[in-house]
Image (spheres, rainbow, N blue to C red):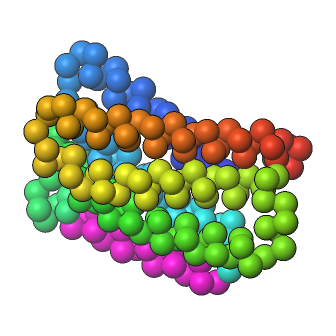
Amino acid sequence: MRFFIYYLFFMFSIDVGALILLKYNVVNSFLYNMLSLVEFNLLFCFYRSVSKNDLTKSASKINSIIYNLIFIGTSVYIGFGIFSNIYNNLAPLFGAFQISIVLILFLREFLISEEILSYKKNVLFWITVGLFLYYLGTLPLTGILSYMKKNDSFQFLYHIQKLLTISMHACFIIGYLWSWNRVK
C-alpha cells in the first residue's frame, strides 16, 4: 500500500504546486509532465506489488517499461522535454491506456479469487474500480482536450474530467471506510 500512499501524496503535492504557480501566472506544464511520469510508474509498481497473479505482474512490468520508453520518446525526441513548458499530452494518453490494461487484469484476478465474496471490505477492489473509472473515462478526454479551442465545449469536457476525479476519490473513500478494520 505504500506505493498507493506515495501516489496520493504526489498527486496532491503537484496539484497544490500547480495552483500556486497558476496564482502567480507561472506556466505549470512542467509539473504535469513530472506528474505523468511519476503517477504511472507508481501505479505500475503498486499493482506489481499487490497482485498475486503472474500475468498481472508481468503486464505491469512490461507496461511500465513501454510507458517509460514512450514518455522519454515523446519528451526528448519530439522536443517537449521533461521540464518543458509545453504539456506532453501523448504520454498520459498511452499511460491511461496501459494502466487500464493492468486494471482489467487485476479485476479479472480479483473476480476469479475467493476475495470476491467480501468485495465491499476489500480496499484494493475499490481503489481499482476508482482508477478504472477515472482512466477509462479520461482516455478520450486526454486525447482531444489539447486540440480543442477554449470555448463552451472545452469547459463542458473539463467538467466531465472533474466529475471523473470526484468519482475516483469517492471510490477510494468508500473503500477505506468499508474496510477500515482491515486497513489499520
Q: Nearer the viewer, residue 147 or 4?
A: 147
Question: How many numbered markers are drawn?
Answer: 0
- Is the stretch drawn in magenta largely helix, strand or loop? helix
Q: Is 71 within the magenta?
A: yes
**Left/right of residue 65 with respect to residue 123 in the rendered view:** left
| Residue 170 percent location from the top left of the image | 61, 39
What's the residue at 21%, 52% (across, down)? 144
What's the residue at 13%, 49% (across, down)? 147
Q: Is 66 within the magenta?
A: yes
Q: Which of 56 and 20 is in front in this view?
A: 56
- Residue 31 shows up from this direction: no
**Left/right of residue 91 with respect to residue 74 in the rendered view:** right
Q: Nearer the viewer, residue 77 or 113?
A: 113
Which residue is situated farthest in the bottom direction here? 55
- Residue 9 shows up from this direction: yes
Q: In which quarter of the image is residue 26?
A: top left
Q: Quadrant of residue 158?
A: top left
What's the residue at 84%, 73% (across, down)? 114
Which quarter of the image is occupied by the C terminus?
Answer: top right
| Residue 175 percent location from the top left of the image | 72, 46
Which residue is situated farthest in the right direction here? 181
**Left/right of residue 33 with respect to residue 45 in the rendered view:** left
**Left/right of residue 33 with respect to residue 63 in the rendered view:** left
What's the residue at 79%, 53% (across, down)? 120
| Residue 101 percent location from the top left of the image | 48, 72
Q: Nearer the viewer, residue 162 or 6?
A: 162
Query: Which residues are the magenta region?
Result: 54-73
